[in-house]
Image: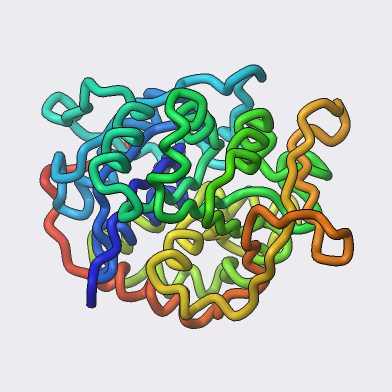
């Protein structure tokens, strides 16, 4: 199988960690870099979470980690620590030998895609601050990126941080608006509602089966996802949610996407009530589409890919423990 080169732009916590593991261990993946953006948890903790994940896979310092925008463009940072805790279940390790690149993540995105124009994709599973900043800094970025996969928004459905907004678009709606109006030729969006809630969620029983596999990866999976699962159940979401890893899987294995449609997608930036709302207009309205929105994913095929990752035997580079 020919490997697909991509950069993963992430706010590492819970399922972002699972996405990194998929990017490291899936046979179709060529993970060129990890770029960090402000989102789920404290920024320095996100960087540590990325290194914890690399360590669990036995690939410490093998993929470069670049530090990006630590605040949204205009809005105050909004945390999801009430959902994810610290994002890795209190895991820690000795970080003294973990390498963080000196080049800014935005410059890394520009450089990597310009060195191989039309060959490297970007999978953005956090707020879009880094991607929008790259657009503003160098408009050639839009043409150099092969495809841009985004986890964000809801398809005219409910939000998960407010009644109207999904977290990634809510945290930096101005960035989302810039990206969606920048002219990328191939944007693919995996939304929270309905796709995540229906296709990327597993019950606690299924979750317990997956997290009981006797591998370092499976144990790590349980550590990073337990807190979010408990939160989900407390607010009426029946299971463990995996939209970030599903977004990456849809890029790596497009055959798992069962339904998709072209939409005109815009993000509300001005309203107090609907900040971050994603308006997804279908063909009826005669607007020029700017994104392909995934509408259904093969649940069993995706979690089959995840099972392959969870069953992979790895030797962590160093010991991890819970603080």
List x then y, in percent, for residue 137: 45, 23
Would you say residue 157 is visible in this rendering?
A: no
List x then y, in percent, for residue 315: 12, 57
Up/down of 138 relative to 57, above or below: above
Up/down of 191 relative to 102, above or below: below
List x then y, in percent, for residue 144: 38, 45
Tell me what residue is drawn at x 39 percent, y 26 percent: 68
**What kind of colouring is applied to the model shown?**
rainbow
Up/down of 69 relative to 55, above or below: above
Q: Which image quarter is the N terminus in?
A: bottom left
Quarter assignment of residue 182: top right
Quarter assignment of residue 5: bottom left
Tell me what residue is drawn at x 53 percent, y 20 percent: 71
As rendered, which of 286 and 124 lies closer to the eye?
A: 286
As rendered, which of 40 and 190 lies closer to the eye?
A: 190
As rendered, which of 200 and 82 lies closer to the eye?
A: 200
List x then y, in percent, for residue 106: 38, 28
As rendered, which of 79 and 174 lies closer to the eye?
A: 174
Would you say residue 167 is visible in this rendering?
A: yes
Q: Is 271 on the left or on the right of 104, as rendered?
A: right
How many labels, in total?
0
Q: Which image quarter is the C terminus in?
A: top left
Q: Is 111 on the left or on the right of 160, as rendered?
A: left
Tell me what residue is drawn at x 57 percent, y 70 percent: 202
Up/down of 28 relative to 229, above or below: below
Tell me what residue is drawn at x 81 percent, y 65 percent: 283
């Amino acid at each position: 199988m020919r490997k697909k080169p991509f950069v993963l732009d992430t706010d590492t916590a819970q399922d972002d960690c699972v996405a990194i593991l998929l990017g490291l261990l899936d046979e179709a993946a060529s993970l060129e870099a990890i770029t960090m953006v402000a989102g789920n948890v404290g920024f320095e903790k996100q960087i540590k979470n990325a290194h914890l994940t690399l360590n669990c896979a036995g690939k410490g310092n093998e993929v470069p980690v670049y530090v990006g925008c630590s605040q949204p463009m205009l809005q105050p940072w909004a945390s999801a620590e009430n959902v994810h805790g610290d994002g890795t279940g209190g895991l820690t390790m000795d970080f003294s030998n973990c390498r963080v690149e000196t080049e800014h993540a935005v410059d890394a995105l520009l450089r990597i895609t310009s060195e191989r124009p039309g060959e490297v994709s970007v999978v953005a599973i956090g707020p879009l601050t880094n991607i929008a900043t790259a657009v503003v800094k160098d408009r050639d970025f839009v043409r150099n990126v092969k495809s841009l996969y985004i986890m964000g928004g809801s398809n005219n459905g409910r939000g998960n941080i407010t009644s109207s907004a999904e977290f990634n678009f809510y945290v930096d709606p101005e960035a989302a608006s810039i990206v969606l109006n920048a002219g990328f030729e191939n944007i693919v969006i995996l939304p929270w509602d309905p796709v995540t809630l229906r296709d990327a969620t597993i019950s606690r029983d299924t979750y317990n089966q997956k997290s009981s596999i006797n591998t370092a990866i499976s144990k790590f999976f349980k550590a990073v996802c337990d807190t979010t699962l408990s939160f989900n159940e407390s607010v009426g979401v029946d299971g463990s949610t995996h939209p970030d890893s599903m977004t990456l899987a849809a890029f790596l294995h497009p055959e798992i996407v069962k339904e998709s449609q072209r939409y005109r997608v815009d993000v509300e930036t001005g309203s107090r009530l609907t900040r971050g709302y994603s308006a997804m207009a279908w063909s009826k309205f005669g607007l020029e589409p700017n994104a392909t929105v995934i509408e259904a994913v093969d649940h069993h095929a995706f979690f089959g890919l995840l099972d392959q990752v969870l069953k992979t035997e790895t030797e962590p580079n160093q010991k991890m423990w819970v603080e």
